[in-house]
Amino acid sequence: MSDRPRRRAGSGAAALGIIRRRHSFDPEPPKKRVILVSACLLGEPCRYDGRSKPCREVIALGQRYTLVPVCPEQAGGLPTPREPSEIQPGGGVRSVSGRNVSFEYMRGASVCLRTMRESGALLAVLKARSPACGSGAVYDGSFSGTLTEGDGIFAGLLKKRGFPVLTEEEIDSIGPIRPPGGRHEDGDQAEGAGTDEV
Ligand code: SF4
């Protein structure tokens, strides 16, 4: 007589049912949540100098989220390359040669706010210190590389509308995805006085 354990009748079919359920085809896999991102952090050459500012940690967020890139300065109609600009102490934004570009910054912020809403993004990860995208600190308008408290025009508008904003230097707060080998591909130094935007 065999000493193998006897299976209960029907247990094989039940097990098969479990297997089928586990391998059943889901026609609508769960969608990834959306994060709005400064395009230059994803490698878009949209900065004032025609270059990008890729950040590996931000790019890695694409493994878990759908990333929607925006560039408020380009969206406002400014060309690339363009003069660096800074928010002035009395309000408004001026380029280093003194051109008033406040309208372009406001228009770009408005366009990108619409993208934020329409994409259903849960937050924005924006470039630190930019006069459009900076959050918490921006250059002080003197083009001397001096920082002051404040937000870029787009980041400030998002905050006023109740959207959370982080810079690329703060994204650990939405879950660390740390690629080996450091923080940014090209460092995070301002390239010229007061022109880190940008
Ligand atoms: S930091 Fe400047 S270049 Fe980068 S997305 Fe914002 S506005 Fe565009």
Image (cartoon, grey):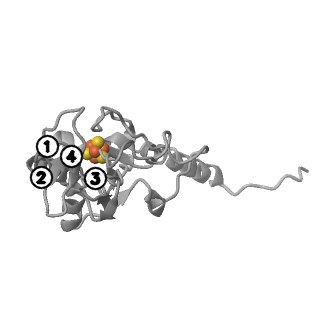
Which amino acid does the dot numbered 4 rest on?
A: Pro
Mark 3 or 4, nearer chain start: 4
Question: 142 or 31, which lies in front?
Answer: 142
Of the pair 142 and 120, the residue shown nearer to us: 142
Q: Is residue 92 left or right of residue 135?
A: left
Q: Find out if the beta carbon at label 4 lies less than 8 Å from the nearest ligand 1 atom.
A: yes
Q: Give whichever of discs 3 and 2 has the lower sequence position.
A: 2
Mark pair 3, 4: CA separation: 8 Å
User: What residue is shown at x 18% (from left), y 58% (from top)?
Assistant: 88
User: Mark 3 near mark 4, Cβ–Cβ under 8 Å?
Assistant: yes
- Label 3, ligand 1: CB separation under 8 Å: yes
The x and y percentages for residue 3 are 89, 53
Disc ID at residue 106? 2
Q: Mark 1 = which residue?
A: 76
Badge 1: few (under 14), some or many (20 or more) residues near its Cα, within 10 Å?
many
Disc 1 residue type (three-letter): Gly
> In terms of secondary structure, where does tag 4 sit?
helix
Residue 174 drawn above or below residue 58:
below
Numbered disc 3: secondary structure: loop
Of helix, strand and loop, which one carries label 2? helix
Mark closest to the chain's N terminus, 4 or 2: 4
Q: Are marks 1 and 2 in contact (CB under 8 Å)?
A: yes
Find disc 4 in the rendering and name its residue.
Answer: 72
Disc 1 to disc 4: CB gap under 8 Å: yes
Residue that mark 3 sits on: 133
88 or 185: which is nearer to us?
Answer: 88
Sequence-wise, which precedes: disc 1 or disc 2? Answer: 1
Query: In the figure, 91 relative to 42: above or below?
Result: below
Reply above or below: 162 against 25. Answer: below
Dot 2 amino acid type:
Met
